[in-house]
């Protein structure tokens, strides 16, 4: 069972009441995303508040974080209040479809639900958090991003590789162009497992890279340590 508390270098995440615990996906996105030095950021489906807290560690921008699940909302509120950045993060209990902030964002991030075809977990709350068909479809997410993203803003997300390819096609059909892409492997000889994507309304030369998390002996690679060293205690 996952621990009820996850300690990072500069903040603590309580997660006993959250369906989706701290995991590699959220840490990867929070460490990888390029944040503006100022302005407004939105974290869609914040869960424990992990990604919002990771971004707050590296920017003075104001961050809105929303979640449809009341337990996740309450947990994120607690984690933000206990952090050094409680004045820069506002957590709200809202669905994306109902969210009307009255302004647009310089950056939007999401670690979205991603199982398109089937439920992969047995716990009902975890299923809801992970199933695109049960909570937030990719079309709903992209429509919300299109409504809330500024003309010069960026949108970043992480998905499993197969779903990421599909999502990228949908995004580009909706006018969001992939300008940065990182393909994630758990080992050098393993297939791609995840896809980190950054989208823009404006066409740019795409930056494409590969990131390997482990060596064959399960030790972390130097590139993964470098990416996450501002956060993980072990690095």
Image (cartoon, rainbow, N blue to C red):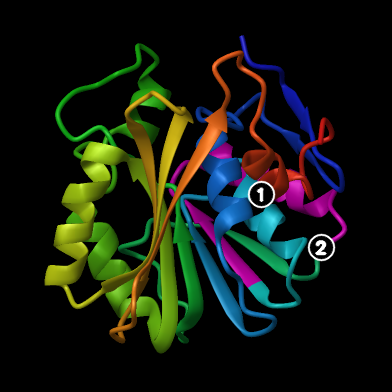
Residue drawn at 36 percent across, 61 percent down: 96
Label 1 neighbour load within 10 Å: few <14, some 14-19, many 20+ = some
Residue drawn at 66 percent across, 65 percent down: 90
Q: Is residue 137 visible?
A: no
Q: Which residues are magenta?
A: 63-85
Residue 172 image offset from top left, x and y in percent: 18, 69
Is disc 2 placed on a helix, strand or loop?
A: loop
Residue 229 image offset from top left, x and y in percent: 77, 45
Q: Is residue 135 visible?
A: yes
Query: In the rendered image, which residue does mark 1 sit on?
Result: 227
Is disc 1 placed on a helix, strand or loop?
A: helix
Location of residue 48 by image quarter: top right
Q: Is residue 56 above or below residue 130?
A: below
Q: Which mark is residue 85?
A: 2
Q: Which mark is residue 218?
A: none
Depth check: 1 or 233 in front? 233
Asked if the magenta segment contains residue 76, the reply would be yes
Location of residue 24 by image quarter: top right
Residue drawn at 76 percent across, 26 percent down: 5
Asked if the magenta segment contains residue 136, the reply would be no
């Amino acid at each position: 069972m996952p621990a009820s508390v996850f300690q990072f270098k500069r903040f603590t995440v309580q997660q006993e009441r959250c369906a989706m615990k701290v995991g590699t996906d959220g840490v990867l996105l929070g460490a990888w995303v390029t944040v503006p030095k100022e302005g407004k950021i939105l974290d869609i489906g914040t869960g424990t508040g992990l990604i919002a807290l990771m971004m707050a560690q590296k920017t003075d921008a104001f961050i809105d974080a929303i979640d449809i699940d009341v337990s996740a909302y309450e947990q994120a509120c607690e984690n933000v209040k206990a952090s050094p950045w409680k004045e820069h993060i506002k957590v709200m209990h809202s669905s994306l479809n109902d969210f009307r902030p009255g302004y647009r964002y310089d950056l939007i991030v999401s670690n979205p639900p991603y199982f398109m075809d089937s439920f992969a977990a047995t716990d009902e709350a975890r299923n809801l958090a992970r199933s695109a068909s049960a909570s937030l479809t990719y079309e709903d997410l992209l429509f919300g991003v299109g409504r809330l993203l500024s003309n010069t803003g960026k949108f970043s997300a992480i998905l499993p590789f197969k779903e990421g390819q599909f999502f990228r096609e949908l995004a580009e059909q909706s006018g969001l162009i992939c300008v940065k892409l990182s393909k994630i492997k758990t080992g050098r000889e393993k297939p791609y497992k995840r896809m980190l994507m950054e989208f823009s309304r404006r066409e740019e030369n795409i930056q494409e890279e590969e990131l390997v998390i482990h060596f064959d002996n399960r030790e972390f690679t130097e590139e993964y340590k470098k990416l996450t060293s501002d956060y993980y205690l072990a690095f």
